[in-house]
Image (cartoon, rainbow, N blue to C red):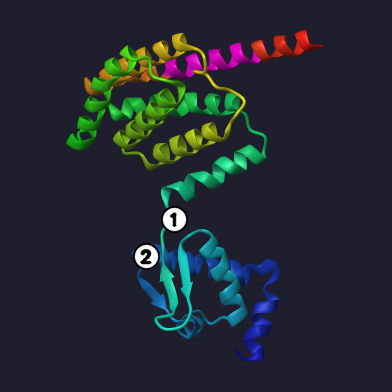
Amino acid sequence: MNNILDLNEAVELGGSVVARTVRELTELSLQAGDGDYLGSEAELLERMGISRPTLRQAAKVVESDCLLSVRRGVNGGFYATRPSARHVVQSPALWLRLQSATLEQMNRASMLIYPTAGAEAAKCTDPKLIAELRSFRAAIDEREAREENQRETLDAEIYLSQLIANMSGDPVLILFIGISYTFGLLEREYRFYRRAPERRRLWLALQRSYCDAILSGDSEIALLIGMRRGRQVESWIAEDKAAAARRASDET
């Protein structure tokens, strides 16, 4: 690159040239398919009219978003990639943990979201997803009869919530539910079902009612049951916090 171009880039304050290049690379990737070739370094430098350091700095940012892969050597160049679902939800869940977010706060936000997911799921017409929910519903009685353990209850709840999110057809709900359950798995303060078979039985009953409402296509009932589920978790959090406070008081 010549000195005039480098000087023009330097005049743009606050790294705005890099920011613009990040946006252009991101858009280029989004317009392509996963694994598509976007061009060589030389081709992108000429197309964007930027310096090599600027392109490489921007590429690192887009790579960190899992939207770009830079390959060296034979068949080298810039390729479009896509983040996995796990990557998408893991980062915000970890960020929430680092911000000292609590399960109580997450549940409060969830109570605004989950009922909507259930109501929208009741409108689902996808035969495959409906069949999955029917299969889940049919297994509830068997799970209850053998008194499943805490891990099984949690795994089943995660599966059900993800299935309902998919049935809603709303990508925002799918993302939020994925983040919230990933956060919940990182949270170690509460274990709702440990040594509490009565809680597991109650939760199975709520799962059963939730499935029935969605499978019958009753959005209003699904909404109400979704709200009830959130309130139940809220009450368990309060109970466990009170019990922990009593134990701490007894120890002192």
Q: Quadrant of residue 29?
A: bottom left
Give the amino acid at mark 2: Gln
Q: Crowdedness of circle 2 by 10 Å Cα count: few (<14), some, many (20+)?
A: few
Q: Furthest residue to the front?
A: 146
Residue under circle 2? 31
The quadrant the N terminus occupies is bottom right
**Horizontally, is 18 left or right of 173 in the view?**
right
Marks 1/2: CA distance? 15 Å
State the image coordinates of residue 114 (x, y, percent, origin top left).
42, 27
- Residue 239 in magenta? yes
Q: Which mark is residue 83?
A: 1
Res 1 visible: yes
Q: Residue at x 62, y 29 (%)?
A: 102
Q: Earlier in the sequence, mark 1 or mark 2?
A: 2
**Horizontally, is 134 left or right of 166 in the view?**
left
Q: Quadrant of residue 31?
A: bottom left
Q: Which portion, as a residue range, is magenta?
A: 227-242
Query: Compared to 111, does 178 lie above or below?
Result: below
